Image (cartoon, grey):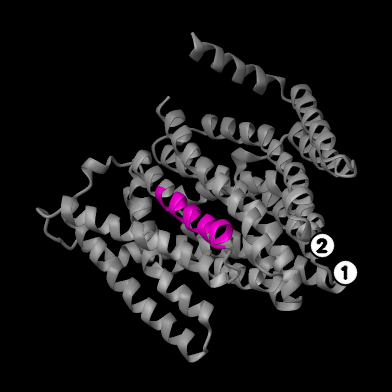
Amino acid sequence: MKTLKNFIRVLSSNTIVLLSGMITGMMIPNILSVESYSSLKTYTLYLSYVGIFHLGYVDGLYLKYGGRSYHNIDKNILKHEHTILWRIETILTIAVLAIGIVRQDFVMALFAVSIIPYNINGFFKQIFQAAGEFKRYARINNAVTISALGLNILGAVVLRVDQYVFYCFATLLANLSMSIFLEYSYFKNNRKYKPVDGRDTIKLIKTGSLIVLGNFIAQFVFTIDLWFVKGFFSAVEFAYYSFAFSMVSMINTVVTAVTVVFYNYLCREREERQIIEFKRYLLVFSPFAALAYFCFRFIVKLFVVKYTASLDILFFLFGAYPFLIIVYALIINLYKISEDKKKYVKSVALIVMTAAVYNFLALKLWHSVQGIALATLMTYITWYLYSMADFKILKPTVREIIWAVYYLAVYAVTSYISNDVFAGIMFGLLILTGGLVLFWDIYSNLLERITQRGR
């Protein structure tokens, strides 16, 4: 019951992030030129890698405190760990800023300034997440999201600013304000504690570095298509692809809610039966996430007409979504709690090489952004199948394989229906019908649980 409450709390927070992303994702492309939007998305692409600039230290802390109560954490040692993080971030910020200045790359320089506030916020979020303090975790998310949304609305609706720099600064300012507030609150509430060296800094970096390396490679898998488009296509095509990519990223907030809560749960409970049950729930209900494709297709045609060229890209990216959900919400968490952290790095390294091959083949065969999007779909299907084989308890059954093929067929066929609303309804009904036929036991079990809680 506590796990469900935590999930609802994080999901509610991430729903705010989702709504914010939808509003700004539709407003800003309408204000900016396609070229300026391309520069903005380059900045956000850089930001997606900001987590590697703590060298795995925060991930080491995440693993160290996973499953513990926040009240049981030694605050003297935590204060020392907080100081170490500041030293790491300061050195790396100066280094990246110097590179940006030498290269006369404004976007890189702006990214360098973003490293400290983003990773300080990340430090507190990871500690709260690991210790099960999801209410505090959600507050940070909400405050940053609402602040950024307010600034973006000010720029796009009130001031009608058509310079991408404003929107970069809006995101940076929201995170900077939160990091200042968190630092002030932290020092105010922890004055009585003195920094004590836990003598495990190197160990934390060593352990965390495997996780951050795995996360970096996993993130590279998630964004490798963007790098290919940026490197081999025009700025306009990159803008179109980035727009489609940002639509998919919005829905990722739901996946994050599952991932955040389930990691804490797995640190405490590792029974095979519960893991298999969770996999089946994800497998049965994740295809409904692809309904977002039909929703966004309708919205883009209605409100963001100049980006209708992104719809073909969007089709392939959302097609991959059910597989992406299972990989990020379940598989990566299983790798993280595993004793063999090298297994995580090896698996994602293999997938990134596979993704690179798929993308190069797409370049050679079609040389189109749609081909790159198809390569992304193939990458996530491959990752899903590989992961199922990598964990024996997750080995797919015949009906699970039939279900995956059925989903892809229904998604492909209904996408040809020109009426977006009707197409979405047909897709939803066919997925529901197929799910009831193949997984009646899952639906009946869920209904029984809901009925019992309602009594």
Q: Is residue 396 left or right of residue 152?
A: right
Q: Is residue 333 above or below residue 291?
A: below
Say which of 28 and 40 sits in front.
28
Q: Residue furthest bottom?
A: 102
**Residue 52 visible in rendering:** yes
The quarter in which the N terminus is drawn is top left
Picture mark count:
2
Q: Residue at x 12, y 54 (%)?
A: 193
Residue 159 location in percent, x, y?
Answer: 54, 62
**Residue type at tag 2:** Gln
Q: Residue at x 49, y 65 (%)?
A: 213
**Residue type at tag 1:** Trp
Would you say the residues marked 1 and 2 are in contact, meaning their CB atoms lie under 8 Å apart? yes
Residue that numbered label 1 is attached to: 366
Q: Secondary structure at mark 2?
A: helix
Q: Is residue 443 above or below residue 118?
A: above
Q: Is residue 402 left or right of residue 224?
A: right
The CA distance from mark 1 to mark 2 is 8 Å
Residue 4 location in percent, x, y?
Answer: 46, 29
Q: Which mark is residue 68?
A: none
Is residue 148 highlighted in magenta?
A: yes
Q: Residue furthest top?
A: 455
Neighbor class of circle 1 (other Cα within 10 Å; few <14, some 14-19, many 20+) is: few
Q: Which mark is residue 370?
A: 2
Over which residues does the magenta segment extend? 143-159
Q: Residue at x 43, y 37 (%)?
A: 265
Is residue 198 highlighted in magenta?
A: no
Residue 48 location in percent, x, y?
Answer: 53, 64
Write down the quadrant of residue 198 in the picture. Answer: bottom left
Q: Is residue 285 above or below residue 71?
A: above
Say which of 285 and 177 sits in front.
177
Residue 21 location in percent, x, y?
Answer: 58, 51
